[in-house]
Image: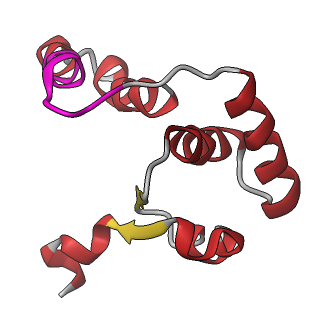
Amino acid sequence: MVTAMELFVGPLRSHRSVEVERITEFLRYFPNLSLRTVDLDVARLAAELRASTGLATPDALIVASGVVAGARYIVSNDADWPKKLKPFGEQLIFVQLGQFSSASE
């Protein structure tokens, strides 16, 4: 849910209600996308990640949610995540969004 919340911030700050509705529809109806709540298992793992890696709280919650849900890939634009998530080894594959943009060419 942390990522979902973050998606809404920009459009809400800019009063772009149409974009807010598009994001809502995407999150609600995109196939094979599931939103996960922060439960005790996620909170504990996030705390462990934060303590051991220095990840910011929202980032630790995002990573922990994925790990608890059994995600294989972590997608971000944060260049620090690969070294911070190294302890996961092969369990998590990091994909940096910038690798797929024309700006990185």
- Range of the magenta residues? 22-34
Residue 89 vs residue 10: left or right?
right
Image coloring type: secondary structure
Residue 23 vs residue 34: left or right?
left
Residue 25 spot, x, y in % from top left: 15, 16
- Image point (80%, 35%), residue name: 44
Residue 98 spot, x, y in % from top left: 30, 71
Give the total of numbered labels. 0
Front position in the image: 91 or 5: 91
- Image point (20%, 18%), residue name: 16
Residue 30 spot, x, y in % from top left: 14, 28
User: Predominant secondary structure in magenta?
Assistant: helix
- Image point (58%, 67%), residue name: 81
Residue 71 spot, x, y in % from top left: 44, 50
- Image point (20%, 77%), residue name: 103
Q: Check the image and name the residue furthest to the right.
A: 51
Residue 62 vs residue 87: left or right?
left
Residue 8 vs residue 88: left or right?
left
Q: Is residue 28 magenta?
A: yes
- 46 relative to 13, above or below: below
- 4 relative to 12, above or below: below
- 86 relative to 41, above or below: below
Say which quadrant the C terminus sits in.
Answer: bottom left
Using the rendered view, name the quadrant where residue 88 is placed: bottom right
Q: Is residue 14 magenta?
A: no
Using the rendered view, name the quadrant where residue 40 is placed: top right
